[in-house]
């Protein structure tokens, strides 16, 4: 194992897309940002230097950060932001994970352009539990705005209405040939015939779950969120924001210049507004020196925009590899059960203003168990660690909804949420079961829930209301997929389990940024264990102050 050093300079960069030139925020002048590459077991030090006028933090999405919560990155949860001209070094060790994750800014909507891949290779002398790929290619799915994304979210929060949608979806930062002015801005993957490629697919989009498919080629899914799974074949994958999926692509014996479209397209469960152009890239069989302009290509067929059944069947195909080399430890006896409703709601409009929220002069909000989480102006974990929690947060987040209703039936008349900063406190190593139930308040909608600091086992999912008397009998405790982000199905529920073996304050939120901004977020406080390696490490000396 070794130590790998990176420097991330947060700096401005001029980028032109769709004939609009905009100054965006970048890491080291790259968009999408640079790759962070390490092996399982390595320690990674990333010195982040803030050269821009915004406050910034970087989150290493999916990295477990065992006892190193100070390096997790969500602003006001584990750290104060890195201010202009300040530096902070994130320092973490990668244990028990291999595959693809990604890093992104974790304050407001800065992650719109501040994101890049994390590639975790197996340890030296260890191989993949699948065919060795000829080449490995990161595929980052994202969104492009012609205006500053900060203006979009600030306007949405001020008016209380929905945000303007992005102007393009992108593949590795490029919109592709179906957008205005973009035929040159098209991602091209040039391949050789009869080889195996590993595509490391990352959904870094702000607000869109996406289907991804390549015409005439089968994808073999082998990893999810940096955990091996039992391989399965599919023509199309569904990937939510926050998820990473590794697939093998076996090229065929096509002759040079044969060209196939790869397409990423939204999966829409609740909303009417999205960018309905199609982001695309090319998979092209290699040839020598002749021109590649204006070649005919084949287009894949994708599921329809709201194909909930496809998504439900697809997600059921994920089974943990769970073999003797990669055994798993699923909690069987549960110490603490939680039932959280997740969904939309409203807040009142301030006096003498007009708001553009859903029912008559309200503001959109979103909540967990009807609590819309308010971010404090100091860091929760610093307040906890230094015994200054008074007035920063409360520890009585409800374990079940205060006012239960028929979550998939007629929604309650009162859509108002409570606004507060409440945590759940867990003793070290508590075995937790958490059922997440989508509500029908202002419409059923899929919510990709992301938990920081943990991978959890997805033991069950279903449509309708979760039934505590019947559904647990169907749970998969043998080979459930282990991940850090799971889609709570529109009009349904998902059940996850984990051991609370990582002390610290851990954010959990919908990875659709508009829902996070509206308050679909909460946090867990996991207490120290008794052994020295079960305690949250002391904060580094350069930890930013608020
Ligand atoms: Cu990738 Cu808290 O998020």
Image (cartoon, rainbow, N blue to C red):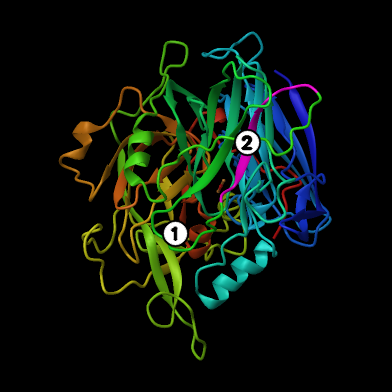
Going by the image, does 229 lie left or right of 34?
A: left
The relative height of residue 366 versus residue 455 in the rendered view (above or below) is below
Quick check: is 281 in the magenta stretch? yes
On the image, the x and y values in percent for residue 163 come to 55, 67
Q: How many callouts does the rendering have?
A: 2
Q: Which residue is mark 2?
A: 296
Magenta-drawn segment: 278-288
Q: Is residue 207 visible?
A: yes
Q: Which residue is mark 1?
A: 422
Q: Nearer the viewer, mark 1 or mark 2?
A: 2
Going by the image, does 188 lie left or right of 202?
A: right
- Cα distance in 3D space between marks 1 and 2: 56 Å
Report the residue at 36% width, 63% height from top. Answer: 370
Report the residue at 29% width, 35% height from top. Answer: 334
Q: Is residue 505 visible?
A: no
Going by the image, does 273 lie left or right of 188?
A: left
- First along the sequence among labels 1 and 2: 2
Question: On the rendered image, what quadrant is the C terminus found in?
Answer: bottom right
On the image, the x and y values in percent for residue 15 come to 79, 53
């Amino acid at each position: 194992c070794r130590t790998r050093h990176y420097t991330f300079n947060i700096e401005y960069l001029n980028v032109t897309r769709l004939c609009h030139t905009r100054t965006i925020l970048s890491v080291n002048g790259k968009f999408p940002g640079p790759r962070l590459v390490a092996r399982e077991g390595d320690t990674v030090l990333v010195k982040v230097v803030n050269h821009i006028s915004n406050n910034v933090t970087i989150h290493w999405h999916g990295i477990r950060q065992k006892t190193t919560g100070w390096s997790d990155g969500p602003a006001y949860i584990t750290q104060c932001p890195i201010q202009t001209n300040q530096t902070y070094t994130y320092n973490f060790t990668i244990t028990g994970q291999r595959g693809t994750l990604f890093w992104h800014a974790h304050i407001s909507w800065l992650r719109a352009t501040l994101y890049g891949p994390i590639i975790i290779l197996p340890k030296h002398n260890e191989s993949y539990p699948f065919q060795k790929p000829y080449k490995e290619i990161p595929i980052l799915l994202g969104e492009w705005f012609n205006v500053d994304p900060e203006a979009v979210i600030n306007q949405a929060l001020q008016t209380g209405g929905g945000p303007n949608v992005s102007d393009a979806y992108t593949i590795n930062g490029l919109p592709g040939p179906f957008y205005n002015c973009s035929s040159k801005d098209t991602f091209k993957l040039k391949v050789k015939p009869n080889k195996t490629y590993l595509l490391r697919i990352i959904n870094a989009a702000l607000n869109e779950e996406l289907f991804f498919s390549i015409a005439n080629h089968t994808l073999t899914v082998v990893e999810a969120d940096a955990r091996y799974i039992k391989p399965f074949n599919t023509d199309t994958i569904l990937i939510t924001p926050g998820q990473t999926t590794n697939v093998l692509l076996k090229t065929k014996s096509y002759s040079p210049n044969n060209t196939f479209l790869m397409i990423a397209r939204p999966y829409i469960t609740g909303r009417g507004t999205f960018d309905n152009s199609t982001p695309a890239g090319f998979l092209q069989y290699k040839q020598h020196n002749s021109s590649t302009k204006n070649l005919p290509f084949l287009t894949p067929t994708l599921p329809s925009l709201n194909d909930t059944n496809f998504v439900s069947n697809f997600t059921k195909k994920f089974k943990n590899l769970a073999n003797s080399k990669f055994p798993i430890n699923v909690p069987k006896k549960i110490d603490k059960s939680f039932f959280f409703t997740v969904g939309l709601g409203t807040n009142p409009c301030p006096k003498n203003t007009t708001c553009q929220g859903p029912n008559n002069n309200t503001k959109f909000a979103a909540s967990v168990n009807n609590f819309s989480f308010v971010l404090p102006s100091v860091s929760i974990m610093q307040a906890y660690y230094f015994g200054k929690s008074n007035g920063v947060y409360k520890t009585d987040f409800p374990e079940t909804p205060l006012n239960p209703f028929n979550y998939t039936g007629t929604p309650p008349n009162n859509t108002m949420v409570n606004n507060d900063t409440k945590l759940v406190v867990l003793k070290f190593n508590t075995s937790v079961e958490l059922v997440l139930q989508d509500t029908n308040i202002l419409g059923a909608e899929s919510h990709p829930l992301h938990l920081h600091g943990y991978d959890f086992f997805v033991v069950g999912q279903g449509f309708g209301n979760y039934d505590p008397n019947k559904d647990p009998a169907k749970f998969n405790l043998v080979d459930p997929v282990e991940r850090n982000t799971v889609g709570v199905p529109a009009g349904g529920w998902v059940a996850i389990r984990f051991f609370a073996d990582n002390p610290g304050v851990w954010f959990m939120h919908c990875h659709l940024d508009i829902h996070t901004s509206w308050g679909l977020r909460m946090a867990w406080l996991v207490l120290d264990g008794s052994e020295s390696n079960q305690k949250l490490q002391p904060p580094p000396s350069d930890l930013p102050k608020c």
